[in-house]
Image (cartoon, rainbow, N blue to C red):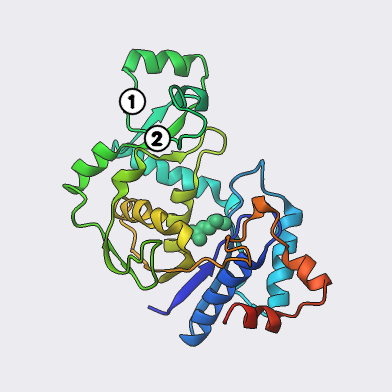
Amino acid sequence: MLFATRFAPSPTGHLHRGHAFSALTAFDAAQAERGRFVLRIEDIDATRSRPEFEASILEDLAWLGLTWEQPVRRQSEHLTDYHRAIDVLRDKSLVYRCFRTRKELDIGRAPHEPAQPFVGGPLPPEEEAAKLECGEAFAWRLSLDAARSALGGFDGLTFIEEGGGPEGETGLIRARPETAGDIVLARKDVGVAYHLAVVLDDALQGITHVIRGQDLFEAAHIQRLLQALLDLPTPTYRHHRLLVGPDGKRYAKRDKAQTLRELRTAGVTPDQLRAEMDL
Ligand code: GLU
């Protein structure tokens, strides 16, 4: 299969150096393999995604010298595809409705503590019917127990890591989807969530290599499980180091990292950025 990789930004802000590093790393890999480079707009979060951020992403990537396949896939235009996959999982009894609110899930958790992975199961049928009757919103969660029985355990779930995880994990990796708990596959508001959309799109777009930051290494463990449950191929993973600033901290939207458009206005060139990033 022809080498294919992607850059999959969420249009919830302007791109910064960290994004540039990731996009250039994936693009260079595709060039080196004479393969395909795909840009995918991950905009299922309608409350945070904005068209002006998408426009600015396209502009910044073109400025960096990247070219990508057309048309660009925009996830918000394919919600019915994702809903269909939820139906498939539901028919196999691999998902259950979760009516809990964030507040209920956080009971007993101190503000400084990370959210615990949730493991539960469906409500008793009468209770569920009553909630449905009242029109209460629900999310679909993947049942780890049901997934484990369907696959006869998770031992056979592996993926190849050609880059490295945060602890230097590399080579043949055994997936540990259980550490994430029963993840939400379909949010209450949009009927889909990140992991499901990514796994389906990577398969649909023929992605052979997922090249992205190390901060998403844990996501591969969950995504590997979804690939098995949905009979989808497993790409090779190449998680790259995270670019850090002079203060030793990674660039992040929330820290108001300098955006690529600001750098551009300040007269920085793509070549200077590449040199700074050792690319
Ligand atoms: N849309 C995700 C993000 O912006 C990236 C998803 C991925 O590369 O798998 O963080």
Residue in front for this viewpoint, 272 or 56: 272
Above-or-below relation of 1 to 252: below
Disc sitting over residue 3 in the figure: none
The location of residue 220, given as percent across then percent down, is 38, 57
| Disc 2: which residue | 116
Specify the quadrant of the image occupied by residue 249.
bottom right
The answer to whether the beta carbon of the residue marked 1 is less than 8 Å from any atom of ligand 1 is: no
Please give the name of the residue rendered at 20% of the width and 48% of the height, measured from the top-left corner: 151
Frontmost of labels 2 and 1 is 2
Q: Secondary structure at mark 2?
A: loop
Looking at the image, which is closer to me, 26 or 90? 26
> Few, some or many C-alpha atoms within 10 Å of disc 2 (few <14, some 14-19, many ≥20)?
few
The disc labelled 1 sits on which kind of residue? Answer: Pro
Q: Dot 1 lies on which element? A: loop
Q: Is residue 64 left or right of residue 145?
A: right
Amino acid on which disc 2 is placed: Gln
Q: Earlier in the sequence, mark 2 or mark 1?
A: 2
Q: Which residue is mark 1?
A: 122
Rendered view: 238 above or below 106: below
Q: Residues within 10 Å of mark 1 (few under 14, many from 20)?
A: some
Q: Is mark 2 within 8 Å of ligand 1?
A: no
The quarter holding residue 39 reads bottom right
Q: Position of residue 187 (x, y in %)?
A: 50, 37
